[in-house]
């Protein structure tokens, strides 16, 4: 299997902005999951 070189630069502004956006989405999804689990128990 050939080796694939990454062109991503984790120090770039674009990378950091995308990482922050994804982290925000994960936070929202986790909060929704907790909310719906709480509502299901009620």
Image: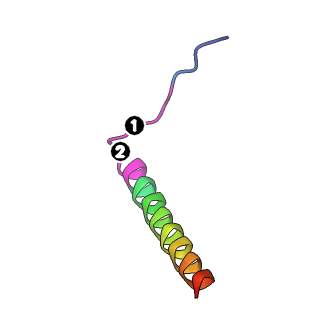
Colour mapping used in the image: rainbow
The residue at the far bottom in this view is: 42
**Is 22 or 26 nearer to us in this picture?**
26
For disc 2, the marked residue is 12
Q: Are marks 1 and 2 in contact (CB under 8 Å)?
A: yes
Crowdedness near tag 1: few (<14), some (14–19) or many (≥20) residues, C-alpha within 10 Å: few
Q: Main secondary structure of the magenta part?
A: loop
Q: Secondary structure at mark 1?
A: loop
Badge 2: residue crowd in 10 Å (few <14, some 14–19, many ≥20): few
Q: What label does residue 9 carry, if any?
A: 1
x and y percentages locating residue 36 in the rendered image: 59, 79
What is the quadrant of residue 2 in the picture? top right
* Outermost top residue: 1
Q: In which quadrant is the N terminus drawn?
A: top right
Above or below residue 14? Residue 5 is above
Q: Which residues are magenta?
A: 6-16
Q: Is residue 39 above or below residue 4?
A: below
């Amino acid at each position: 299997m050939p080796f694939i070189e990454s062109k991503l630069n984790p120090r770039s502004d674009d990378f950091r902005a995308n990482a922050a956006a994804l982290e925000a989405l994960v936070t929202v999804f986790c909060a929704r999951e907790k909310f719906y689990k709480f509502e299901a128990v009620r």
